Image (spheres, helix red, strand yellow):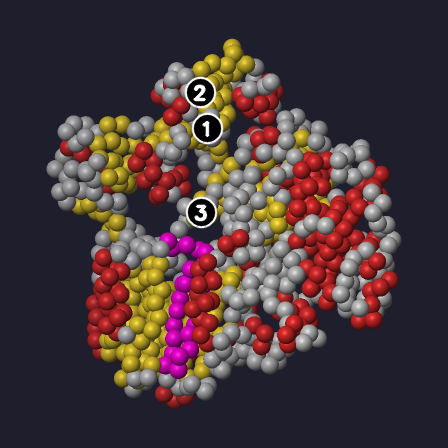
Amino acid sequence: MATTIEVKYAELGAAKSFLGNPIGNEKDTADGNGRYRDYEGGSIYWSKDTGAQEIHGSIRKKFLELGWDKSVISLPITDECIAADGIGRYNTFGEGHELGIYWTPQTGAHEIYGDIYKKWLALGGVKSSLGYPITGEKPTSAPSQGRYSEFQNGAIYWSKPTGAHEVRKEILDQWKKQGGENGLLGLPISDELPDVAESERYNTFKKEKLTREWKSPGINPPKDHNPQYPITAMHDRNLSNHTKEGDALVKKGFRMISLSVYGEPKDPLYASVWIQNPEAAKQTAIYKASGAEYQQFYNDQVKKGFYPIIISALGSGSNTVFAAVFEETSGPKPFARHGLVSGPVDGPDKKIHDTSTFTYWNRWAKSNNYILRWATVYGSADEPYYAAIWDSNEDNVSWDVVFHRADKKLALNFNETDSSLLEPGDFQAVFDAQVAQWMRPAFITHAPHGRYIEVYRDDQLGKFVSKIGLTSSEYQAEADKLVKNGNFYQLCVQGAVVNGKTQFAAIFTQRHEARPRQLTVTGQSIPSLYAFDEAMQEFMQNDNVRAGSLAIAKDDKLVYARAFTWAEQGYPVTRPENIFRVGSNSKQFVKLLVLQLAEKGVLGLDDKYIDRVQLTTPVSEMGNKIPQMTIRQMLEHKAGLPPSSGDWDSLFKKINEKLPANQKKQYPLSLADVVNVQVMIDLDDNLIGKFSYSNTGFTMLTLLVEQQYQMHFEQTVQKYISKPIGVKRAVVTGSLLSEMNPLEVRYHSTNPGVKRSAKTPDQPMVPFPYSGNFQTLPGTGGLSMAPADYVKMLSVLFSGKDNVLLKNSTVQAHKDNLDGHYGGMSGAVAYMVRRNDGIAMAVSLNKDFEAPYDIKLNYLAHRLNQIANALAGKWPDHDLFPLVGIN
């Protein structure tokens, strides 16, 4: 029986790989807790905690020089990987990921570990301003008792009393000239920070600080602000005091990041937040302007290259007061509108294209890759108006907005049709649901008549606190607690006078700059198939997909299984074993199970559907030609059924409309409940016999499967498909977050809305991806599995011979219905295919795209197939199925 090291060697291509031929036999590591074997081009090390990992080239040489091969605690835990900038290479070592060796042709291979390694990674690693290490870790000279590593553009110094701190090149050179750690200044006790003057940056050392010149980019500031910059805030200031204090702050290099005008239009009050950011662009502001004056100010500033970034308004009619902040920019321009009204009230077609509505411009922004940055609601209780600013969404950040309309109903999900509206008191429930899907509040404001606007974004600032309805004293107490004692900062503060009392809405965060994303790749690295890595990386980074997985089989062997995480630090790392929703690829399992029944003679494909299921709907109440509909027509999408039977709410109403009061259904609906309504649908005579994709037909077929096998769909799949081929992970996905399988990834939507759950009688507000009832519709789109599980099914099914799933004659007869599919739903998309050249491919992503989703997925599928085409005759011969838990 092959050892784990031998299996690994074979997977890498054995003697044909970069490792070449073996040199000697396997040996124990010096501590006896691991094993290794040397080869002409490298080594493979193994322990029960690290598994088998290859190491070669300059990194291996450095590894041996350091003696890390002597102990299991410093064995490699990854193969050699490509660094995040695509230039260098690295291996990580040790169970806690606290050891690394990084290499580039220019710098060579150097080790980095411990607190210095952690600090470097926190700064951005190879993408940080420091660059790659150019030395290993060294002790500082006595008596400082510290350690340091040097990098291309600076160094990181550490000691037990001071911790680890970066010192960039210019200040590092000054410091060394003054004696370094043993000079008068001592060790650094801060990272490089901006000084009060916009032209300087500094490090603080034990004795004093050193500064360097800093040339501000001026007109292209970062979109968010670094929390290391000083921040100050003020509230309840009248115009004179706010102007005076603001002017003083501007002279010190402060810029506004929040502004609110509130109170009485004749003598308004102001609240603002300021950040001392040397990299910020120039600003100009107007604090008390009529609508006409604001428009003139807008026109004048735009001519000068200044565009609005903040807007606030108060009052109504001729008493309206506008306050706004404009910023100089030469990059993508924001756009702004004011005087907008609520959107459609009576239906989707009444005002949906009305450019005077707030909803229209939010929809337009979404469709044209803009993002709502700032908004305000003003006017009277009976006639509210909205003003807003939208930024270019260059980073493809998903976003949502919820606001109170003229009738105080809550509008959300970029929709104001009656069925989508919520009651005013649901504002908190919406917040809870958005936070549950890892969204963050980015902006909040309110008006004297009790209306709120809140914007959510799918990027991360770390911890946050969002508060509404605070009095002036409560807001001050909250600020004292969070800012002075909790290391938080005001991101947004908005005031309004409600029933004669000032109230504040505020968001506090621990950062003002979104956490950067980083790429993590797991699974066996196959150098000859690296083009697939590049394709997945490019696609996920361009579209901000956090988790993806790709598996490829050649004939009956798994040759590639890699998982990708493009996410903020702390996000769960995706592995090839993680499961994803596969959407409509679930239908392939319905087809398999129906064809198995046909092979066993339990039913015929030309049998009428209603003859093979037990329904409570009388034939007399069934839709036109439903009684004549055959199983074959349904399998081939040629029955004339509609694509969908409607959303959960419409199904719920149809089911209950004919039931007496004491028999009304409650959520969750059963599969039989749904199908007994679906058979009342009339077939379309023009589509019978023609391909017309239908989810409805496969919901009906799922009921047939459950009744014929006399078990739930998930158990049927596991018994008759998964178990015979050695797959253990195929399950019906959880509907609610609390029901998710531990192996299942998180789901994120391009349109991250919320709605009421169809899973429980109380129908809590939940994120879109968790709002359905997958247990009721498992065969339509409810299965989850790893891509490797799916390609295993395809490899067995298309083996070219009779197999444990179907006879080959059955497979060939139904090949066009079995060999490929797209799947998409809120929060997930998938592409599965078995090609004629023996390649089976499955890719899953944990984010959906704007409809039609298959345009994006087609691009990725085309790229993957191009790479596969170029590899004809060059595929590796190893089999990774055992490594991903498939026997």
Image point 24% across, 61% down: which residue?
481
Measured as percent of width and height from the top left, residue 793 is found at 69, 39
Residue 286 coordinates in the image, percent (x, y): 33, 75
The kind of secondary structure element at disc 1 is loop
Q: Which mark is residue 571?
A: 3
Left or right: where 628 falls relative to 852: right
Q: Residues within 10 Å of mark 2 (few under 14, many from 20)?
A: many
- Residue 457 colored in magenta in the image: yes
Query: Looking at the picture, how far across and down is residue 656, in whole percent?
Result: 66, 72
Instruction: Provide the residue designation for mark 1.
Output: 50
Mark 1 or mark 3, whichever is nearer to me: 1
Mark 1 or mark 2: whose residue is earlier in sequence = 2
Find disc 2 in the rendering and name its residue: 34
Question: Which region is colored magenta?
Answer: 438-462
Residue count near mark 3 (Cα–Cα under 10 Å), binned few <14, some 14–19, many ≥20: few
Cα separation, mark 3 vs mark 2, equals 31 Å
**What is the quadrant of the C terminus in the image?**
top right
| 3 up-or-down from 512: above or below | above
Please identify the residue farthest to the front as the structure is shown.
662
Q: Magenta segment: does it hold 236?
A: no
Mark 3 or mark 2, whichever is nearer to me: 2
Up/down of 412 relative to 706, above or below: below
